[in-house]
């Protein structure tokens, strides 16, 4: 069947205005894209904080000049005036036999009887031995003298959580604004995560370095005080050998052993103080490193919040403009 005639008739009718021969216009959907609005929103990089330095000084036990002079004199078979004065003062407290017994007891390293300890205390009370005793200087950390019981502990800092704002306008235009904000936020989240990883990585690196220094310090402390003990014992043995070889009074031997005993006690307490100082240096350094980390993490969070607030404001403005772009309400 030929359909062209009715079609021609229809067009004739349209020519007389009875109908419209033109194709009906199709309205194109509006595409909303706000991604460009957020292209300049970034998280400001954090300039990492350098942890506060830990200042420390090393403790020591130093031989007295009087003892050094006595050792030099004994090496040549003589005694100094200070040795003679100390010997005379001791002779007024204990007999020569008691002096020998005390000297042997001190040399053996055993526990003194109450009577022997009382005699030692009495000899020290004369003050005649003071000039021979070593000088002890305790270690310090940040200007604070450290005893064998000094300690500290690091602090903790809790970061604030971010509450995200939601737009809540439900049409295609505002949905597009909110979707663009979500994309921008994801970029900000990734930037913050990267910045935080750098900050935490710096702390881990510092923590490892601090631990390495601490381990080395403890090893050096052990070596130092072991060497000092050996040197002190060798010095005392040489002095006593000269006393015996030259037939000098037994009070001289007692003097040497009292000084050695006091010196070894100082070594022991000083080593304990040095260990505590090393621990304090480590703990303080870790505290300072943690404080620097926490400061930087807080700055990173603040920078992130600033950027996210800006992005949220842009998204809100974009959503508000949706009505001017064909959006419905």
Image (cartoon, grey):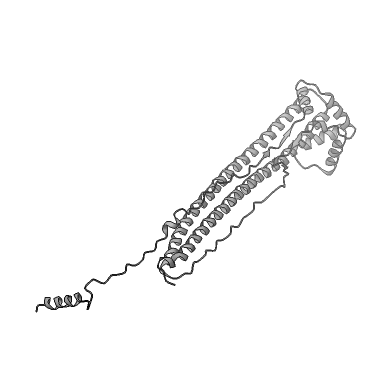
Looking at this view, is 113 or 88 the one in front? 88
Please give the name of the residue rendered at 67% of the width and 39% of the height, measured from the top-left corner. 56
Work out whether 190 lies above or below 141: below
Looking at this view, is 198 or 71 the one in front? 198
**Image position, residue 258 (x, y; %):** 79, 35
**Image position, residue 21 (x, y; %):** 21, 73
Q: Kindly indicate the quadrant of the structure image that contains residue 6.
A: bottom left
**In the drawing, does residue 260 fall left or right of residue 201?**
right
Which residue appears farthest toward the right when viewing the image? 92
Please give the name of the residue rendered at 45% of the width and 71% of the height, measured from the top-left corner. 170
Looking at this view, is 81 or 78 the one in front? 81
**In the drawing, does residue 311 fall left or right of residue 55?**
left
**Image position, residue 46 (x, y; %):** 54, 48
Q: Is residue 174 visible?
A: no
**In the drawing, does residue 303 fall left or right of residue 97?**
left
Pick the quarter of the image with the C terminus.
Answer: bottom left
**Image position, residue 140 (x, y; %):** 71, 40
**In the drawing, does residue 248 fall left or right of residue 234?**
right
Please give the name of the residue rendered at 64% of the width and 53% of the height, measured from the top-left corner. 155
Work out whether 59 lies above or below 88: below
Pick the quarter of the image with the N terminus.
Answer: bottom left
Work out whether 164 lies above or below 258: below
């Amino acid at each position: 069947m030929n359909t062209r005639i009715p079609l021609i008739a229809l067009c004739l009718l349209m020519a007389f205005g009875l109908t419209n021969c033109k194709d009906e216009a199709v309205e194109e959907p509006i595409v909303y894209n706000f991604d460009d609005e957020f292209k300049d929103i970034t998280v400001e990089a954090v300039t990492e904080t350098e942890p506060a330095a830990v200042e420390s000084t090393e403790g020591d036990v130093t031989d007295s000049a009087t003892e050094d002079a006595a050792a030099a004199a004994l090496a040549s078979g003589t005694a100094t005036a200070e040795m003679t004065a100390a010997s005379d003062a001791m002779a007024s407290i204990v007999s020569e036999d008691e002096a020998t017994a005390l000297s042997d007891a001190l040399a053996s390293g055993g526990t003194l009887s109450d009577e022997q300890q009382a005699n030692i205390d009495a000899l020290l009370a004369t003050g005649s031995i003071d000039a021979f005793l070593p000088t002890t200087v305790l270690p310090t950390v940040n200007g604070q003298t450290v005893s064998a019981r000094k300690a500290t502990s690091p602090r903790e800092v809790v970061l604030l959580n971010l509450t995200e704002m939601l737009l809540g306008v439900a049409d295609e235009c505002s949905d597009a604004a909110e979707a663009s904000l979500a994309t921008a936020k994801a970029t900000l989240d990734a930037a913050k995560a990267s910045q935080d990883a750098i900050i935490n990585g710096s702390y881990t690196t510092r923590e490892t370095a601090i631990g390495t220094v601490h381990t080395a310090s403890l090893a050096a402390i052990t070596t130092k005080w072991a060497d000092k003990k050996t040197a002190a014992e060798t010095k005392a043995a040489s002095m006593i050998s000269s006393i015996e070889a030259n037939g000098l009074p037994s009070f001289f031997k007692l003097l040497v052993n009292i000084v050695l005993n006091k010196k070894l006690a100082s070594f022991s307490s000083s080593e304990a103080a040095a260990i505590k100082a090393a621990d304090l240096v480590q703990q303080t350094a870790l505290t300072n490193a943690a404080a620097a980390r926490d400061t930087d993490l807080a700055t990173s969070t603040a920078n992130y919040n600033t950027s996210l607030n800006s992005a949220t404001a842009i998204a809100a403005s974009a959503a508000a403009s949706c009505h001017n772009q064909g959006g419905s309400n």
